[in-house]
Structure formats: C-alpha cells, structure tokens
Amino acid sequence: MSVDTPRSYTQPESRLEAAELLRRIGLELEALARLSLRIERSLSEIELPEHLPVGIVRELQGIDRISQSLGELAILLCTVSAETPSEATFSRSELFSRLRLKELINNLDPAHRDALAKRDSDGEIQWL
C-alpha cells in the first residue's frame, strides 16, 4: 500500500502535463476576458463628460480589444491543449517558481482542482 504525498514545487520529479497546463491557461484567459467585459460594462454605467479627449476614448476602446483578444487566446490555447501529446510535460517547480501571484498559481496548477470553479462563485471582493 502506498501513501500519497502532497505535491510540492520543490520536488524535481514533480511533472505537469503540458496539455492540462495549456487548458488551464485557456480557462484563466477566458476568466480574464469575462472580467474585462464586466469592467467595460461598469465603465459604461459611469456618467462621463459629453466631450472626452480623443486619447481617453481610444484607451477606453482598448478594453474591448483586450476582452476580444483574451477570448480568442483562450480558444486557441484550449485547442492547442487538445492536440498536445500526453507525454509532453513540464517541471512544476520550474514553472510555478517564476510566478508571484498565488491565486494564479492555484488556478493553473491541476493539484488545485477546485480553484477555478471556486473563484467565480465566492463573490469576494479584494481591492488592490
């Protein structure tokens, strides 16, 4: 009988399937696209002066481009994920040791299976 040990980013043998990582990056991009759309909708509810400088209008329109690009990248990564051989893997410690955002690490690491689902349903607001 073997005992499961928790995965650690310090274990050199800890590997991560490339397909699963790509899929989770796609899901993260999709979530960011939805967030960007919510920001865009919120900004449209704010009463702005009738005549905004052209530069500000262009920058606000950039939010739409960001939303669309994130959505397209999400689709692309999920498609690439489906075509990636299961033998392709990455070193978990090499990948995640370079990231600083704990929430992002949790969302991308398959060891945290419920992180993506929980994020959208918890309703918690955090101010930066």
Image: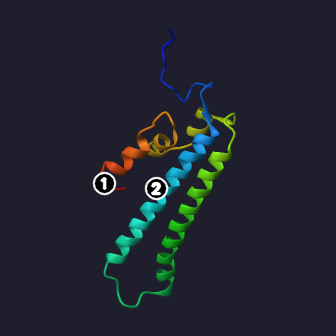
Figure label count: 2
Q: Residues within 10 Å of mark 1 (few under 14, many from 20)?
A: few
Name the residue: 37% across, 44% down. Answer: 118
Q: CA distance from mark 1 to mark 2?
A: 15 Å
Task: Depth check: give the residue in front, 93 or 21.
Answer: 21
Q: Residues within 10 Å of mark 2 (few under 14, many from 20)?
A: some
- Chain-order first, disc 1 or disc 2: 2
The amino acid sitting under disc 2 is Ala
Colour treatment of the image: rainbow
Mark 1, residue position: 125
Occupied quadrant, residue 51? bottom left
The amino acid sitting under disc 1 is Ile
Q: Furthest residue to the top?
A: 1
For residue 32, above or below residue 64: above
Q: Which mark is residue 31?
A: 2
Element carrying mark 1:
loop
Q: Are marks 1 and 2 in contact (CB under 8 Å)?
A: no
Residue 78 image point, x, y percent = 59, 51
